[in-house]
Image (cartoon, rainbow, N blue to C red):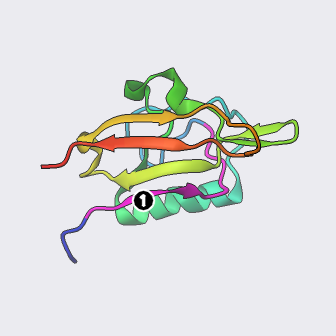
Amino acid sequence: AGNFQILMLGDLNGRTNSRTPSVHDPPRQSLDDKPVSTRGRFLFKLCADYNLMIVNGVQRFGPNSGAFTSYQGTRRTVIDYVICSKSLYSKITAFSVLPLEADYDHCALTVQLEVN
């Protein structure tokens, strides 16, 4: 196994509620209280298999970190994520969900890393 770290951002189309892939991950709080979807369960398995964690909604990044990311008509969901290696998590200095801009249906996500 190589010594590498993963930082994944994208529209992953999985609802994860406020759950975490592992009981050892920091607590998450999401505005999306819908049940975990099949794709959300896949994300949890991916995180467990590759020692990853979900950054969205982690309390140390403030209440906005669990904001909705997708707006489809009247539906609002969290399906866009930042997922990282657990070993990279301590290097993340900021994360936020930006406000929805006109003519878009997804919010931009920002993540700031400390790089040595």
Q: Is residue 64 left or right of residue 79?
A: left
Q: Which quadrant of the structure image shows residue 67?
A: top right
Q: Is residue 55 above or below residue 13?
A: above
Identity of the residue furthest to the bottom in this view: 1
* Residue 2 % position (x, y): 20, 75
Q: Residues within 10 Å of mark 1 (few under 14, many from 20)?
A: few
Query: Type of residue at label 1?
Result: Ala
Q: What's drawn in magenta, residue-wise?
A: 5-17
Main secondary-structure element of the magenta-colored stretch: loop
Q: Is residue 63 left or right of residue 15?
A: left
* Residue 66 % position (x, y): 55, 31
Q: Residue drawn at (33%, 41%), measured in percent from left and top?
A: 112
Q: Which quadrant of the structure image shows residue 103?
A: top right
Q: Residue drawn at (23%, 67%), measured in percent from left and top?
A: 4
Identity of the residue furthest to the left in this view: 116
Residue 24: tell me if it is visible.
no
